[in-house]
Amino acid sequence: MTISRSRPRLRTTLAAVLSMPSMAALADWSKLNLPFGVTPYSHTIYHLHNIIMWICVAIGVIVFGAIFYSIFKFRKSQGAVAAQWHESTLVEILWTIVPLLILIAMSVPATKALIMMEDVSKSDLTIKVTGYQWKWRYDYVNDGVGFFSTLGQSSNVARQLKSGIDPHSVDNYLLEVDHELVVPINKKIRFLTTASDVIHSWWVPDLGWKRDAIPGYINESWALIEKEGTYRGQCAELCGKDHGFMPIVVRAVSEADYKAWLEKMKAEQAPAPHASNELSNNTLLAQRR
Amino acid sequence: MSDAAIHDEHHDHHPYGGMTRWLTTTNHKDIGTMYLVFALIMFFIGGAMAMVIRLELFQPGLQFVDPVFFNSMTTMHALVMIFGAVMPAWTGFANWLIPMMIGAPDMALPRLNNWSFWILPFAFTLLLSTLFMPGGGPAGGWTMYPPLVLQTGAAFPFLIFSIHFMGASSIAGAINIIATVFNLRAPGMTLMKLPLFVWTWIITAFLLIASMPVLAGAVTMLLTDKFFGTAFFSAAGGGDPVMFQHIFWFFGHPEVYILILPAFGIASAIIPTFARKPLFGYASMVYAAASIAFLSFIVWAHHMFTVGMPLAGELFFMYATVLIAVPTGVKVFNWVATMWQSSMTFETPMLFAIAFVVLFTIGGFSGLMLGVTPIDFQYQDTYFVVAHFHYVLVTGAIFSIMAGTYFWLPKWTGHMYDEGLGKLHFWLSTISVNVLFFPQHFLGLAGMPRRIPDYAVQFADWNMVSSIGGFVFGGSQILFLVVIVKCVRGGQKATDRVWEGAHGLEWTLPSPPPYHSFSTPPAPATIEGGMR
């Protein structure tokens, strides 16, 4: 009894003690490498990225090792005498074929990941993302809800030239918006990206991809978010003066919370004069599914 | 060239003195010198722009410049460095070296040569003048993607016409080099005896001829879209903004190899010299360069994986892109094999050449990673890309330009450069360039987009490190200028061969060489003797 009761307490204490350095280490690592992310796709490419990076590191160790070995071993000042050989067909064939085989091996998981990304079928809901200079618009195609999302006010004040405000004092500096994109977790969300003026690119690193928002094009991509939380990103395609100031914030919530939020938004937006017009556009888009 | 004895001996006729001589010269060495000086000036102008960029990015928040000026700095930095510094530097090397390397008196088309150089100062005056125009310089990125680039103000037509001029200059230079190599080789100098610098330049020249007109077409369509009511790239008028990207990168990817192939040639000249051992796999080096050139025409869309292409297209461009790693790997392995069991010394050109092999290979690794489409959806348009192309262009192309400058400067001027200052320049540059660009890999992977004037605070640490590296790297280049000026003005007399292990026809000429390189072709025995 006592043991079992003390166990959780012990575990919590241990976890708290252990998490101090490990969280710091994790925080540092996240500054150095791709995010693991919160979607199946982001996990897939995180592993793929690590595999290919370590293959590169291994090849680098061999090649640079040979170079530095040569530098230390074959120097004239150490009395090295130059050999005069300068050809070997066997060696040449070998170092053509071996890299080719490594590339083929790499291409297999890469092809699988790409096929996974491009399969937008059987989605649960569709969100249209429209890029504007310099804000985003989100339309919930199936529900007739839509709104603009712009840089948060405190960031906007601090980011002015010579504002004198320390960016470190602003919460989520440049990564805060007035209206977040709210989505349910564990649902396959289809994103349709387009733009109204110039090309933008919609990117949330934790989802594992970015997709260009291009006037005249509707691009499709998808995400299935596994974890509740707030995920931040930015426009990734140069789109003019305030390209650096049109962030993206996605808040992933449980399905119940999402439903409640949606009802609230519907109620707020119902009397809007453009609602019927928006709806017919969106219904057309929905029929593409 | 100012050496009176050499002037008299070789009937050096300058019909004019002073500035008119330089305006009217048709001599390959004079024109080569002008190209190199022009490239150096542009290197410092483009570098100053980079300093503005790194200064603003030193800390989060906007302290020094507004976002529009920041964007025009990134745009102009790229245009000036690519078209003003690296490409003219290569043409300068080609002018100076190709006639001497193949045993010719001069270039095949000397007047065209004069013209192709003198277009450039006008092109860059047009381009740089836009910084003082209402609305400022072009700020839509050097890639000039519509519709954004069509929002450019008064600078727009100047941008387009300066690109036309640069293209015309490059095409003329390329034609001249092809004509020279195919017609003016000394008897006995067969194609498979050409130095690799000449080989890589012929391949580069063909890439230029094939790709520059495509760029000219693309920017002309931009011009008519802006001023004459066409809608090539406007979705609202039935056009297609993505088509511009396809056309641009059909030029843009071969352009990447235009910038780097001559660097391969220079590394292949320097490493065997200081290793005192023949280049390993000469023939495979030629075939690898040709394969890279061919592949460069079928991989363009890897610059735009995120525009939303069909799966089949994405797969094709991924496979073709990663395939380039094979011939590039062959080149790197050959350089390493050349060093193996050699007898090396480490003068400044060799130091830069070895740093080139190592650091260019790092750029190659990140290039391979970027070529893998599903992960590129994450890397695209981040600082990871910025780190990648600066590793291949700065520690690739520019390091080999520096290596080549130290290598041939004694031949060109007749004086040895200051070895101590050269080595100091090398170590400062090599350390600082890694402090500058390596952390940008981390920034990109952690999620910092490129081309932004301000950033979220989690990117602050590495940006500060990168900026410090940038300032030291920028400052170190003043040493480069000092070494060059000192060497031109005087110094220890250089021998004809200059380097103990040097092979090739240019080393059989006096240092500095006569005004007309080979008035009579070198004897076939000299050619054989120069071969390794």
Image (cartoon, coloured by chain):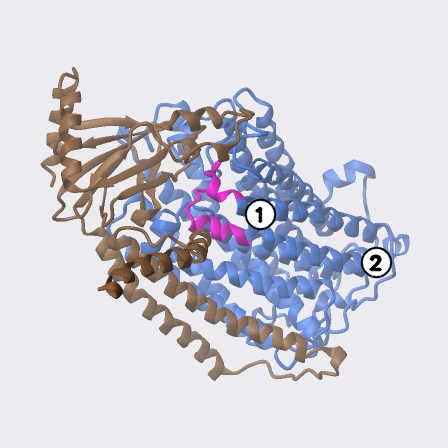
Chain colours: A brown, B blue
Is B494 colored magenta in this rendering? no
Vertical arrangement, residue A43 with respect to residue B450, above or below: below
Look at the image and tell me whether residue B512 can be seen: no
Residue at the image point whose x is 73% and y is 55% from the top? B425
User: What's the residue type where badge 1 is placed?
Assistant: Ser
Quadrant holding the C terminus of chain A:
top left
Chain at numbered mark 1: B
Q: Secondary structure at mark 2?
A: loop
**Left or right placement of residue B321 versus residue B467 in this view:** left
Task: Decide: is B72 above or below B306.
Answer: above
All told, the count of numbered labels is 2
SS assignment at label 1: helix
Residue type, label 2? His
Residue at the spot of label 1: B466
The answer to whether residue B32 is visible is yes
Q: Is residue B441 magenta?
A: yes
Have a look at marks 1 and 2 and say if they share a chain. yes
Residue occupying the point 48% across, 45% down: B212
- Which residue, given by chain and number where applicable, does mark 2 sit on? B415
Depth check: B54 or B294 in front?
B54
